[in-house]
Structures are given as C-alpha cells and as structure tokens.
Amino acid sequence: MLEYKTIRKIAGPLVFVEMENASYAELVKIKLENGEERTGRVLEIAGKNVVIQMFEGSLEADMKATVSLTGRGVELGVSPDMLGCVFDGMGRPISGKLIAKERLDINGNPINPYARENPSEFIETGISGIDVMNTLVRGQKLPIFSGAGMPHNRLAMQIARQSSLRGGEKSDFAVVFGAIGITFEEAEYFTSSLKKTGALEHSVMFLNLANDPAVERLITPRMALTAAEYLAYEQDMHVLVILTDMTNYCEALKEVSTARKEIPGRRAYPPYMYTDLATIYERAGRIKGRKGSITQFPILTMPEDDITHPIPDLTGYITEGQIVLSRSLHNRHLYPPFDILKCLSRLMNSGIGEGRTREDHSGVSNQLYSAYAKGVDIRELVAVIGEAALTEIDRSYLTFSSEFEKKFLAQGENERRDIERSLSIAWELFSHLPAKELMRVKPKFIEKYQKGNKN
C-alpha cells in the first residue's frame, strides 16, 4: 500500500493532496504524525490533484500526515443477525453483536426504472391521519415536513413501533432507523423507546450525534439504506426506513460545499442538492422479481416553518407526497398535529379499497377532506362576521371541523388504531352532517356503515 506525503492544503474537513490512481468515493487512510489513523473518502479528482473528505475532522492534522488508498469504497458489514443492533453514524456497532457475512458499498446500485414495480400494498401505521387520509404503500417515499420544537421525533417513534404489514407475518417486516445530527438525549429516547416496547428486535438503528463531525452526516442515511437494501433484497423483508432529520444532512452538504468554495445555489445550498437528495430518496421502491420492498419516511424540519425553503421544496419534487405538521395545532396541544389540508399521498389510491383496506375507504377520505376544508373556511368566516350569521348547515360544518380535530386527528402517543377503527371514527363524525351533504361517499356505503345519522 503506497503512502503519499504530498498534502498541499487542509481546509476544514477537506484535505488537498497530490496522488495517483485514486478513484472517486474511494476510502482512504490518513495517518497523523502522532500515529493516530483517520479515515476519509475521495471527493474530487482533477489529474493528480485529489480532494479528500475526512470523516473524523481535520483537527491536529497537518502537512506531515500520510495518505494511503485502500482500493475500496465506504462499506457496511451486513448479516441476517443485524436486526436488534444499534450502530453509530459510520456503521460501527454500538450495541448488539454482529459478525458480518459480507460488506456492501454504501452507495448501492442504481435501479433500472424498467425494473421498478408500482407500489400497491397498504402499510398500516396505526395513526388515523396517515392510514385513512394519506395512506402509505409499500415502496413509497412519503416525507414528513415539521418545524423546530414540534413532535416529529415522537411521531417517528410511534410509526417505528406501530407500523406493520396488513395480513402479513411480523417476521417479514423490519424498521431501519437513521438519526442524523441528533442530541444525546434524543438518541437515548429513540433507543429506550424501541427497547421498552420490544420493537428493537425487528429494527436496525444508526445514530449520528450532533457532536460527531458534520461530514459523517453525509454517510449515515446511506448506511441505513444499505442495511435496508440487504434486508429487502437478500432477506426478502419489507423494510420501513425512517430518516430524521434530513435538514441536518443538507446543512452538512452545504458545509462541505462551502469548504470546497463551490458556487452556491438557492440560499447558499449547493446547486446539486436536488441530485444528491435523489440518490437517497430514489433508493426506495419495489423491484420486479424480488419479494422485499423499501419504504421511506424521511423527516425534515422546515427552517422558520417555510415550506418553500429549498430543502422541503426539492424533497417534495422527488418524493410522492408529504405529511405537514401544523404549528397552530401543536400550540393547542393536539397530537399528532397534522396540517391535513396540506398533506398528500400521491400513491394512496393504489393501496386502498376492497381487498386492501376497505371498500368505503376512498369515499370516506374524500368526504373528510371536503367537510373539514369547509369547516376551516367557516371558522375563518366566524372571526369576521360572528357565529350568529351562520346557517344551520354552516354550524354543522363548524362542529364537524372541531370534532374532527379532537376525535380523529388527536391520538395518544401509544394508541394504535387499525384501519377499521379509524374508518369507524370517520363515520361517527359524519353523523354531525346532514345526510344530503355526504356527496362523496356512495349511498350503499352510507346505508351500510352510517349509524345514528337521523338528519
């Protein structure tokens, strides 16, 4: 193994060195003068000039350090026994024993679009606002747009604990949880929450802490997705990947871009951030001829709750919908605080209906959206003209919107509702409306499922 003593400059996490035969994304070893060894990867090659990104940071590194190529990329050791293990952001085991059966490149292999199979099977999260109105299907990527101080971590844990295949074997389902740039308290909460409920037994966790070098955050989601691909395509499992917080990932991407003195794009983020995010999100899906699947729940915090910010904006272009959390509902202590009128699951119709969820699901969802939207409009009107000016039908929609938030959206953190229970609550809410207003559900379903509506 050749060692190069040709470092020309060190800038933040980047090392500029002259060397030959380097390959893009190749893993390198950097040996400091004091004998300490650190790792990095090749970020850019221009002739003999190579830029290396150091994972452990460049503190105490100087021009006298030596650089050697390993001839391989950054890899993750995988095994069928990895369920129940907790890793750090670089894929090193923190708890649980793991003897790696093989090592896989964390960049994965691109999926031929022709080989993709359309997602069409329902995943039950046990949360009414998702299962009924923004249904998740196997192979989908459905992000959660949150804000600082909002309960997205609690929601992520609830999804990880409760999610299951409808009618499938529990052993066929696994959760891969990738935490990016989180605090020690958050890491402790995630780990203890899964252990307490026994969900850790069918989960794999990757924890990148806030005090870890920022560049490691670029590795963590790829580590998580490599584990997911192994479980899905080699072990025939259906894997739900939860990534939080993708905003920390994008900030790390910006930091590295700034160190490289690249021309910035929108709000100083690198212009290739869309492409970079796509290399993560597009690793979800189903492949023809393979039993397993990968479904993604990326979570991000919108800076200043701005949904037009580059991070949520670009994420929305790549993914298949979004679940948005509401600051006003959170301030009213409603959990989970879904801003339901801004939420969307583009693949929902592929995974609902008779034989998948229930025959009335589509109509119920459409009716809930319609009635709640009218109720919100009337609520805003009341603030201007007062409630005395409302008609009886207006009052019924006002009541519906309030009861919808209290009984349907609001749900205990440890409360799991199956799809039948969630749909039953929706039909109970419809009793607040005159029967003639239920125009988005078929009459035969009203007769079959509606109870107590005497209007």
Image (spheres, rainbow, N blue to C red):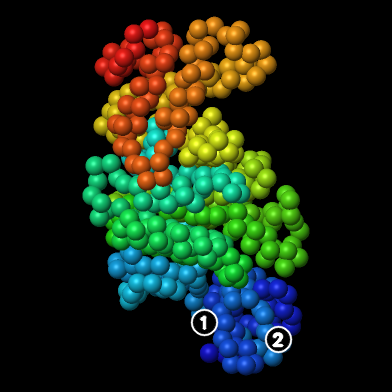
Tell me if 161 is positioned left or right of 243 in this view. Answer: left
Q: Where is residue 261 in the image (x, y as percent from the top left)?
A: 76, 65
- Which residue is depicted at the point 38% across and 72% down? 95
Tell me if 320 is positioned left or right of 443 in this view. Answer: right
The residues tagged by marks 1 and 2 sit, at their Cα atoms, a distance apart of 21 Å
Residue 245, which numbered label? none
| Foreground tag (1 vs 2) | 2
**89 or 337, which is in the foreground?**
337
Amino acid carrying mark 2 in the image: Asp
Residue 62, which numbered label? 2
Quarter of the rendering occupied by the C terminus: top left
Dot 1 alpha-carbon crowd within 10 angstroms: few under 14, some 14 to 19, many 20 or more: some
Q: Position of residue 219 (x, y in %)?
A: 53, 66
Question: Which of the two discs, 1 and 2, labels the residue nearer the N terminus?
Answer: 2
Visible residue check, residue 135: no
- What residue is pinned by disc 1? 70
Secondary structure under tag 1 reads strand
Amino acid carrying mark 1 in the image: Thr
